[in-house]
Amino acid sequence: MEISVYVDGSGGSNAGYGYFVKETGESFYEKKPEITNNQAEYLAILSALKKYVNSNEKITIYSDSKNTVNQLNHEFAINNEKLRNLAQEAWNLIGTFSNLSIVWIPRNENMAGKMLGS
């Protein structure tokens, strides 16, 4: 089975992050005030990675954060230490997957954004 996980996060005083699994309808959301948009996007991806860490399924994580996707795919440098630490944690998990993709999608196609109301 192929698994499509849509992630989204938002920063600021009402910050939070989460994911939505298209095939199962399962969702997760956690409020985490006072983080940045980029931190929230990373935390959303990390939560999805942790959920499927021992899975052998083909997994695609969809994010509307071009910055985060490009950083995790080693296309953009990461100049912020907090983000670099989150990316390192993500890369450690990514290394355990046999068939994982992290893909950018436009915001209007992000099912997690619709579900999370962001």
Image (cartoon, rainbow, N blue to C red):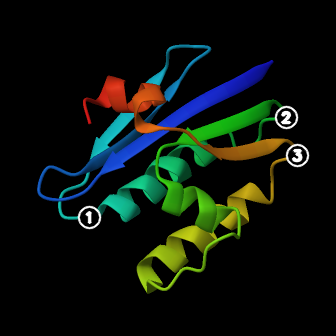
Q: Is residue 108 above or below residue 14?
A: above
Disc ID at residue 98: 3
Where residue 19 appears, x then y in whole percent? Answer: 46, 35
Disc ID at residue 56: 2
First in sequence: mark 2 vs mark 1:
1
- Gap between marks 2 and 1 measured at Cα: 32 Å
Check disc 3: other Cα within 10 Å, few if <14, some if 14-19, many if 20+: few
Q: Is residue 81 above or below residue 60?
A: below
Check disc 1: other Cα within 10 Å, few if <14, some if 14-19, many if 20+: some
Foreground pick, 57 / 38: 38
Q: Is residue 110 above or below residue 48?
A: above
Residue found 50% across the figure and 62% down from its top: 67
Spot the residue most to the top. 24
Residue found 62% across the figure and 40% down from its top: 61
First in sequence: mark 1 vs mark 3:
1
Which amino acid type corresponds to the residue marked 3 in the rendered image? Ser
Residue found 57% across the figure and 18% down from its top: 22
Foreground pick, 80 / 53: 80
- Gap between marks 1 and 3 measured at Cα: 31 Å
Spot the residue most to the left. 13
First in sequence: mark 2 vs mark 3:
2
Instruction: Give the quarter of the image for residue 4.
Output: top right
Dividing the image into 4 quarters, which one contains the C terminus? top left
Instruction: Give the quarter of the image for residue 30.
Output: top left
Which amino acid type corresponds to the residue marked 2 in the rendered image? Asn
Could you tell whether 30 is left or right of 69 in the image?
Answer: left
- Tell me whether the residue at label 1 lies in contact with that at label 3, contact meaning CB atoms closer than 8 angstroms: no
Residue placed under numbered mark 1 in the picture? 35
Disc ID at residue 12: none
Check disc 2: other Cα within 10 Å, few if <14, some if 14-19, many if 20+: some
Where residue 9 appears, x then y in whole percent? Answer: 35, 47
